[in-house]
Image: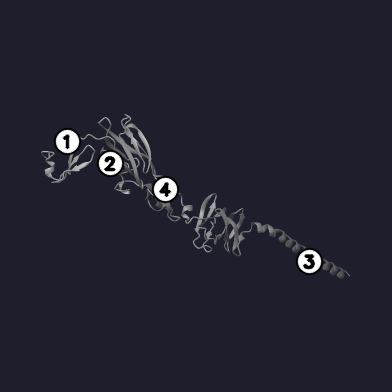
Amino acid sequence: MVMDGYKVIEKFNKNNMNMRNLLIIAALFMSALIVSPILAATTDFTADSAITVTGVTFGGGTIDMTILNGSTAESWSFNGGTFTATNPGTFKVSTADATVGVINITQGGSTVECAVNSNPGTSYVTLPTTAGTYTIAPSSSSSCSTSLCSSVDNAATYNAYPTCGVATCNAGYRISGSDSSATCVIVGGSGSGSSSSSGSGSSTETVALGEVKNIGTIFTSGKNLLTYIDSTVNFSISISGGSQEEHSLVITELDMDNKHIDFTVNSNSLTASLSVGEEVLFDVDGDEINDLKVTFNALVVNQIDLTLEALQIATVSEDTRLIAKEGVEGAAVYYIANDGKKYVFPDPKTYFTWYNNFD
């Protein structure tokens, strides 16, 4: 009986152990069921196939974008047109919309990655793998350089990222430096514009950028002037009293877009503003009689084309009326009249009816 009792007890113990094992297994199974949803919220996202994200904000409307198969991240979200991904692994996004020029990836308002949508539906951008939340932002821009390169004043286009720097400049500016250090500086010197004027003056003077130049006497026949902002021209002009005065003119402001200038006749601080095709009259000696007319003929890049005309007849002294090209034997001789114009003597016979010799 003892043995039989032992067997009964042993059998009970075995059954009891089996029950414990079943209870432990059941508990583990239930635990797995409870834990499983929690793990799903923190486990990296993996795209088992391409995922279409509909309604991403683009310009004044929306477009569809695609998370490519195999993309990974901690998570991604779409809310009110904004498409973001957090802690990307290899996370790739494309769009089949041909109106999208580039796909920008921004973080904190700055573009950190970009790809050109050169083949809509095939081209894609790969998000950075640095931890953080990134926004996928489609753009109509045709180049990533505009988004990724630092802006440069007066740049028209940029070198491709990551070189950056200026590729071309706006009108009136030229490239200084190269590659990433290239910038735009204003075009300078007389060679940047035209060598001829569209003005009505009898002669033309060209003044380089920043140059101070004496251009002689302004007559009623007028003198054209090709100059630049901050260049200075000194000239003399007859005034209403019959004498001559020395004056200077400086362009102080230039609006290239609107073709507008501000300038000063410095001797008496006379100022004026002109647009192309306009003219202004000056009373340079303050006697309420105008002595000088300035006409703004044209703007060639940043070269300013003016005509200066005297409104009073100049008195030319007899010892400065005759001119000829120096050092040239038999050169033509010209007579300077009070109107400032040159008149050539056609032959020596005519000349000697005016003067006795060539001294």
Q: Residues within 10 Å of mark 1 (few under 14, many from 20)?
A: few
256, 111: nearer the viewer: 256
Sequence-earlier tag: 2 or 4: 4
Report whether residue 37 is seen: yes
**Which of the 4 image quadrants contains residue 284?**
top left
Residue annotated with mark 1: 319
Q: Indicate which disc residue 18 carries.
A: 3
**Which of the 4 image quadrants contains residue 314?**
top left
Rendering coords of residue 213 (x, y %): 28, 40
Q: Residues within 10 Å of mark 3 (few under 14, many from 20)?
A: few
Residue annotated with mark 4: 154
Q: Secondary structure at mark 4?
A: loop
Q: Which one is in front in this view, the residue at disc 4 or the one at disc 3?
A: 4
Kindly identify the amino acid type of the residue bearing the numbered disc 4. Answer: Asn
Report whether residue 90 is seen: no
- Residue at mark 2 to residue at mark 1: CA–CA distance: 22 Å
Residue 10 located left or right of residue 309: right
Numbered-mark total: 4
User: Dots 3 and 1: beta carbons under 8 Å?
Assistant: no
Kindly identify the amino acid type of the residue bearing the numbered disc 3. Answer: Asn
- Residue at mark 4 to residue at mark 3: CA–CA distance: 85 Å
From this view, report whether residue 59 is shown above or below residue 220: below
Residue 36 located left or right of residue 6: left
Residue 67 located left or right of residue 274: right
Q: Which one is in front in this view, the residue at disc 3 or the one at disc 1?
A: 1
260, 114: nearer the viewer: 260
Sequence-earlier tag: 2 or 3: 3
User: Dots 2 and 4: beta carbons under 8 Å?
Assistant: no
